[in-house]
Image (cartoon, rainbow, N blue to C red):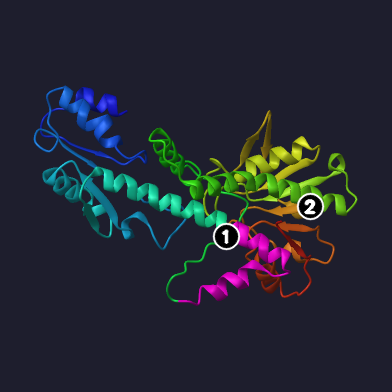
Amino acid sequence: ACASVVEYAVAGQLIVLTSTSYVGTTRDLLVEPLRARGLTADEDVCVAFAPERIDPGNEDHTPERTPRLVGGAGPHSARAAAALLAPTASVVRTVPDPETAEMAKLWENTYRAVNIALANELADACHSLGLAPAPVIEAAATKPYGFMPFYPGPGVGGHCIPCDPHYLLWQLGKARQQAPLVATALAANSDRPARITERALDLLARAAVPPRDARVLLIGVAYKEGVADVRESPALEILAGLAGAGADVAYCDPLVPSLRVGANTLHHVPHPHTRPWDLVVLHTVQPVHDLTWLCAADAPPVLDTRQRGPLARAAERAGSGARPAAEVTA
């Protein structure tokens, strides 16, 4: 894409790169190739990097309510890009150069990836100690400084958090540098769906249900609530793992009508309460999901990968204290 832009660029244009990549991408793919064509960045053509900031499904922090970074190839480029983006953000903050903006974006997403891995590890510790993670996290979050709550889950998904930190590791590797904490966190996040699959199979074994006879339902397959995006969703690996063990798998997610898992295409089950299940895995509870059917005394066992109490809230809405014990992930 950058090569095509450079090929057809003319003097007087403004080129703003927004895709997350390694530090130096803007210079390597835009500034230097433009120079080779006789166009000097910040003189003939304005060039800047302005990483996208979007949290799909987050109605409180829409792009228009979120600050935006701009790193220009020079002062003219920074001013032009900031003026262009000003109507699309709450505020535009200019930084010294494209490399600063590029590294800031990698820092943001690496921060999230590392903290997600930490949340999962500490949730496992809580489980081993007989504690529910959510109340512990909420208690810690009462500290007004030095803490930001992250909650456990089945893994990471989407096109940013699972991928972006690898740009940093790749670049550091080229320079024979290491980031062992980051690498360990990414490996832990990558392993999480397999851990969930193992936990599900363990629960089936405890119930004396062989995998080949098991009927397992996933609630939600998108990588996060409020979206239909299944890119890098942990649900894909969990479904494939359970199916590979012989289980009859299905899912309920009104935002995702169909889903390709291996060689098979699965379709959303619109009325899961009308079918028998040996295990229900809470993967992504969408706002439209009604979980009150899981609060009945004869409801199937539930594996809650998010551990944020959706069944308790569903029981409150149903006006009944009866609900199955939601197993936490191990």
The answer to whether residue 96 is above or below residue 24 is: below
Residue 323 drawn at (x, y percent) = 77, 68
Occupied quadrant, residue 286: bottom right
Q: Residue at x 71, y 70 (%)?
A: 315
Between 252 and 54, the residue placed more toward the observer is 54
Residues shaded magenta: 120-143
Residue 282, given in percent of the width and then of the height, sits at 68, 55
Q: Earlier in the sequence, mark 1 or mark 2?
A: 1
For badge 2, the amino acid type reads Leu
142 versus 111 height, above or below: below
Task: Answer above or below: position of 186 versus 310.
Answer: above
* Residue 8 screen position, x and y as percent: 20, 24
Q: Nearer the viewer, mark 1 or mark 2?
A: 1
Residue type at mark 1 is Ala
At 79% across and 71% down in the image, what residue appears? 322
Left or right of 151 in this view: 3: left
* Disc 1 + disc 2, Cβ < 8 Å: no
297 with respect to 114 (left or right): right
The circle on residue 279 is 2
Disc on res. 253: none
| Residue at 21% from the left image edge and 29% from the top image edge | 32
The secondary structure type at the circle numbered 1 is: helix
> Residue 119 got which mark?
1
Mark 2 surroundings within 10 Å by alpha-carbon count, few (fewer than 14), some (14 through 19), many (20 or more): many
